[in-house]
Image (cartoon, grey):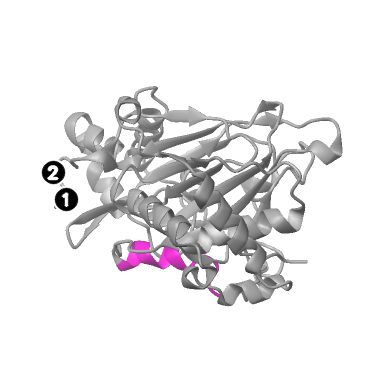
């Protein structure tokens, strides 16, 4: 049982040393699990949008489904993230990569749209060629460093297709471990973080908005529902909400954001790694933040860094308070498609 105002116990409030002592977050697929994954991928229909109707029960992959159930449980009640390896993608074409990723995703949870075009699977690659990113350019379209943040959906996933030769490391931190640190050493910030911050919603092609907007209500950084504490924060979008609305945060609010980021960047809290082609990273958006270092692409355009991304709600996940639960739907007004043309 977890409660605001009390230290969060157990694996969900991990520090880096805990990941060394217990490596439940490292998932190596067995030969049998890989065979069942590949077979399930090949059973998907030719037309991608027909994949939206498939469920794990239809894949005929019991050992693989059982392993994914264990991964979902780790997301919900354990460390909150897993790195999945063992898949050799050399020689697979784009269609097969999407098939494999989709089978993994729907075995873990219910996928939601991640942008205004309704994409269920998105490409994370530099589309602006190192140019300065504007207010409404989403971070995954650039090669910039991305500061600590949570995404939409209850969980996020990255599937590495090609890695950059320089940079592109991912980092993850437990917001619940940060909460314990705040409770012990910086309790003056908790009231501000319980109230939370409004969210800047970027303007995207096809979203029907003339410009980006600011949410009408704040999203609590830390909240509690039915004995489980949830945590959610996007540092950049919280700051943009203040900037674009000409409503400067108070010194107290800015200090709270700076304190959270400073703790997140400490070596004892932040775990960093670089995905290899064929590896996946999945994480719980209601307990962890993640970030990415800047990267330099291969000069050959065909070898550019490419990750595939999904937002989903893990099977068996607890429901947070309504102000936070609304983030689970992703882009709720978008008509879902596997990939937008």
In x, y percent, where is residue 222?
28, 50
Q: Which residues, given as a range, are shown in magenta? A: 322-333
Farthest residue toward the front? Answer: 32
- Looking at the picture, tell me which residue is in the foreground, 73 or 263: 73
What secondary structure characterizes most of the magenta part? helix
Q: Reply above or below: 80 against 155.
A: above
Residue identifier under label 2: 6
Is label 2 or label 1 in front? 1
C-alpha gap between disc 2 and disc 1: 7 Å
Contact, mark 2 vs mark 1 (Cβ under 8 Å)? yes
In the rendered structure, the answer to whether residue 308 lies left or right of residue 193 reads right
Name the mark on residue 164.
none
Please name the residue shown 46% across and 52% down the image: 247
The answer to whether residue 328 is magenta is yes
Residue identifier under label 1: 2
Of helix, strand and loop, which one carries label 1? loop
Q: Quadrant of residue 176?
A: top left
Please name the residue shown 77% across and 38% down the image: 304
């Amino acid at each position: 049982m977890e409660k605001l105002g009390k230290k969060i116990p157990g694996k969900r409030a991990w520090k880096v040393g805990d990941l060394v002592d217990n490596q439940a977050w490292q998932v190596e697929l067995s030969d049998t699990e890989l065979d069942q994954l590949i077979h399930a991928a090949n059973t998907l229909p030719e037309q991608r949008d027909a994949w939206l109707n498939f469920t794990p029960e239809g894949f005929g992959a019991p050992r693989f489904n059982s392993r994914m159930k264990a991964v979902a449980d780790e997301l919900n009640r354990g460390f909150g993230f897993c790195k999945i390896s063992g898949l050799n993608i050399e020689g697979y074409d784009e269609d097969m990569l999407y098939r494999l990723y989709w089978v993994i995703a729907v075995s873990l949870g219910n996928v939601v749209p991640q942008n205004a075009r309704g994409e269920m699977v998105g490409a994370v690659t530099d589309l602006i060629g190192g140019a300065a990113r504007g207010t409404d350019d989403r971070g995954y379209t650039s090669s910039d460093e991305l500061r600590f943040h949570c995404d939409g959906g209850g969980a996020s996933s990255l599937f590495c297709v090609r890695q950059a030769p320089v940079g592109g490391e991912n980092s993850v931190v437990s917001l619940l471990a940060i909460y314990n640190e705040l409770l012990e050493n910086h309790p003056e910030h908790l009231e501000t973080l319980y109230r939370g911050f409004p969210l800047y919603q970027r303007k995207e092609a096809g979203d029907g908005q003339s410009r980006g907007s600011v949410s009408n209500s704040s999203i609590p950084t830390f909240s509690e529902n039915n004995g489980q504490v949830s945590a959610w924060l996007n540092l950049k979008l919280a700051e943009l909400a203040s900037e674009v609305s000409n409503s400067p945060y108070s010194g107290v609010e800015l200090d709270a954001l700076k304190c959270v980021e400073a703790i997140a960047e400490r070596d004892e809290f932040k775990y960093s790694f670089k995905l290899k082609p064929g590896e996946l990273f999945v994480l719980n958006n209601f307990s962890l933040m993640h970030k990415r270092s800047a990267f330099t692409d291969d000069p050959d355009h065909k070898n550019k860094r490419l990750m595939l991304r999904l937002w989903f709600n893990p099977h068996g996940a607890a429901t947070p308070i309504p102000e936070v639960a609304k983030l689970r739907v992703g882009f709720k007004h978008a008509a879902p498609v596997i990939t937008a043309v």
